[in-house]
């Protein structure tokens, strides 16, 4: 019994190291979605590219008509995902007991509080502990735009004034 527990802690530690960043465009999309849902909760899963969260997976079945998002619905499809995000219209960016249970199935969990700004969100690990998530510029693969010579233009100094904590 102790041996099994020890192994699972080791595995969790390795997984927890993976996601450390979120694309600034993805964060802005999340903030806008939370704001649009207000006063109801917004909830979605997050997908990562390597160590960076880049996609929001919105599940149409998510019931946000009640006071809290239905986590059961989120867990039903066994799709690979890096994390979760949901909003707290009350503005309190603190996980509830139900949140902490759900967090265990996700590497990183974002809670966004009203007023849904870059200063009103926090990230938590599987154990419900605050975790750092660096906001970074990320170049999305998009066939509509050529990407030759884009690299220099994409460094626009936004790294410095954003940290979200
Ligand atoms: Zn919550």
Image (cartoon, rainbow, N blue to C red):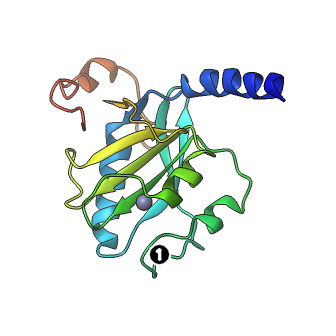
Q: Which quarter of the image is occupied by the C terminus? A: top left
Q: Quadrant of residue 137?
A: top left
User: Residue 53 or 63: which is nearer the viewer?
Assistant: 63
User: Where's residue 9, x and y in %?
Assistant: 67, 26
Residue at the location (29% across, 72% down)? 38
Query: Could you tell whether 89 is left or right of 109 in the image?
Result: left
- Quadrant of ligand 1 in image: bottom left
User: Where's residue 21, x and y in %?
Assistant: 41, 29
Residue 107 in sight from this viewpoint: yes
Looking at the rendered structure, the number of numbered marks drawn on it comes to 1
Residue 142 in sight from this viewpoint: no
Residue at the location (24% across, 32% down)? 163
Residue at the location (41% across, 47% down)? 110
Does residue 18 lie above or below 107 as drawn?
Answer: above
Q: Which quarter of the image is occupied by the N terminus? A: top right
Crowd tier of the residue under label 1, counting other residues whose Cα lies within 10 Å: few below 14, some 14–19, many 20 or above:
some
Does residue 90 lie above or below 63 as drawn?
Answer: above
User: Residue 28 or 44: which is nearer the viewer?
Assistant: 44
Query: Could you tell whether 73 is left or right of 142 in the image?
Result: right
Does residue 7 lie above or below 84 as drawn?
Answer: above
Q: Which residue is mark 1?
A: 64
User: Residue 54 or 151: which is nearer the viewer?
Assistant: 54
User: Where's residue 16, x and y in %?
Assistant: 56, 27
Q: Quadrant of residue 152?
A: top left
């Amino acid at each position: 019994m102790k041996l099994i527990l020890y192994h699972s802690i080791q595995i969790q530690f390795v997984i927890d190291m993976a996601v450390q960043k979120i694309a600034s465009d993805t964060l802005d999309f999340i903030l806008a979605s939370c704001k649009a849902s207000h006063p109801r909760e917004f909830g979605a899963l997050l997908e990562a590219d390597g160590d960076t969260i880049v996609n929001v997976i919105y599940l149409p079945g998510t019931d946000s008509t009640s006071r809290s998002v239905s986590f059961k619905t989120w867990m039903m499809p066994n799709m690979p995902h890096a994390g979760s995000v949901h909003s707290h219209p009350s503005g309190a960016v603190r996980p509830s007991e139900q949140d902490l249970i759900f967090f265990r199935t996700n590497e990183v969990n974002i809670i966004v509080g009203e007023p849904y700004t870059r200063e009103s969100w926090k990230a938590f690990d599987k154990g419900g502990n605050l975790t750092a998530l660096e906001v970074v510029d990320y170049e999305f693969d998009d066939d509509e735009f050529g990407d030759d010579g884009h690299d220099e233009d994409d460094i626009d100094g936004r790294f410095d004034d954003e940290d979200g904590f």
